[in-house]
Image: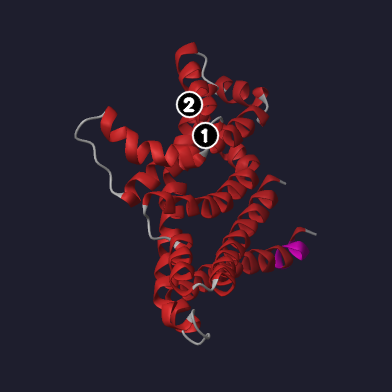
Amino acid sequence: MLLSLWPHSWDRQRRAKATLVVSALLLVALLWGLGELLSLLPEPIGSNAAQFAQGARTTLALTLASGSIGLALGLAAALAKTASHPLPRTIAAAYIWLIRGTPLLVQILFVYFALPTIVPGLSLPEFGAAVVALSLNVGAYNAEAIRAGLLAVPAGQRDAACALGMQPAHVLASVVLPQAWRIALPPLASNLVALLKDSSLAFAIGVVELTNVGNRVQAATFQPVATLATTAAIYLALTTLITQFTNVLEQRAERQRR
């Protein structure tokens, strides 16, 4: 019976890997071929195709950089909030409370304008300030998703691993985190998609990302319908490809969980 099921399972794994590869290739093709594609459209899009393409690349760069740092921050905050010592729990809880209770736009403006006055000599470029603010923001939301995954792992599994002589760090890395990751993956994927759209707020400090490009073009051409529709379409294409990529990861994690 197991042998009869193996080819079907193998085909599913191949399809999942193929979907991941195709999604990644489509995303790369979209980023690097977007300028040529948009140049075929009528004015005012055709003459500004290169600006839209560069804005899309900047948006994705903001998303990937902030998402990677935010994932690390979220893991650290989740572990701190579930620690037995009250000090890390208090620090993590304060961080999550502060970030989730204030608007992202205010956080971006604070990092860019206020932080250099608090820390003399610290002057972040627009892109760097946006990455810091976006990372801190998504990290707080990731922390709660990962914490939920950590708490969902039965305590008996930790006790059994410790009874086998495993060190606490080994138990965390080999037993707890893999299971918590599979549970937390869906909300983490949603946070990544939300981050891509939230990166549009970086235009407030002058980052020339996709929304900023669309705003500049419509201000120069007085054609808001075409420019904003193009901006929305590019965001939709990016989020669709990223969602497709994360959906495959979720399906693979779900199969491993079973």
Which residue is farthest left?
A: 121
**Total tally of numbered discs in the picture:** 2
Residue 142 in view (yes/no): yes
Q: Nearer the viewer, residue 55 or 63?
A: 55
Magenta residue span? 3-7
- Spot occupied by residue 59 in the image (x, y as percentages of width and height): 45, 59
Q: Is residue 138 left or right of residue 152?
A: left
Q: Is residue 167 visible?
A: no
Query: Which quarter of the picture shows residue 207?
Result: bottom left
Q: Residue at x 64, y 31 (%)?
A: 148
At horizontal 69% and vertical 65% (from top left) the residue drawn is: 12
Task: Indicate the amino acid at tag 2.
Answer: Tyr
The image quadrant where one finds the N terminus is bottom right
SS class, disc 2: helix
Whether residue 246 is situated above or below residue 38 in the rendered picture: above
Residue 78 position (above or below residue 65): above
Q: Is residue 258 left or right of residue 108?
A: right
Residue 29 at what x, y percent from top left? Answer: 48, 76
- Residue ID at (50%, 27%): 98
- Secondary structure under tag 1 reads helix
Query: Was residue 6 drawn as part of the magenta stretch in this picture?
Result: yes
Sort mark 2 into few (<14), some (14-19) or many (20+) by Cα contacts within 10 Å: some
The x, y position of residue 119, in whole percent, is 25, 29
User: Label 1 belongs to which residue?
Assistant: 140
Residue type at numbered disc 1: Ala
- Rate crowding at label 1 as few (under 14), some (14 to 19) or many (20 or more) other CA atoms within 10 Å: many
Whether the residues at callouts 1 and 2 have beta carbons within 8 Å, the answer is: yes
What's the colour scheme? Answer: secondary structure
Q: Which residue is mark 2?
A: 95
On the image, the x and y values in percent for residue 96 come to 52, 28
Furthest-right residue in this view: 1
**Mark closest to the chain's N terminus, 1 or 2:** 2
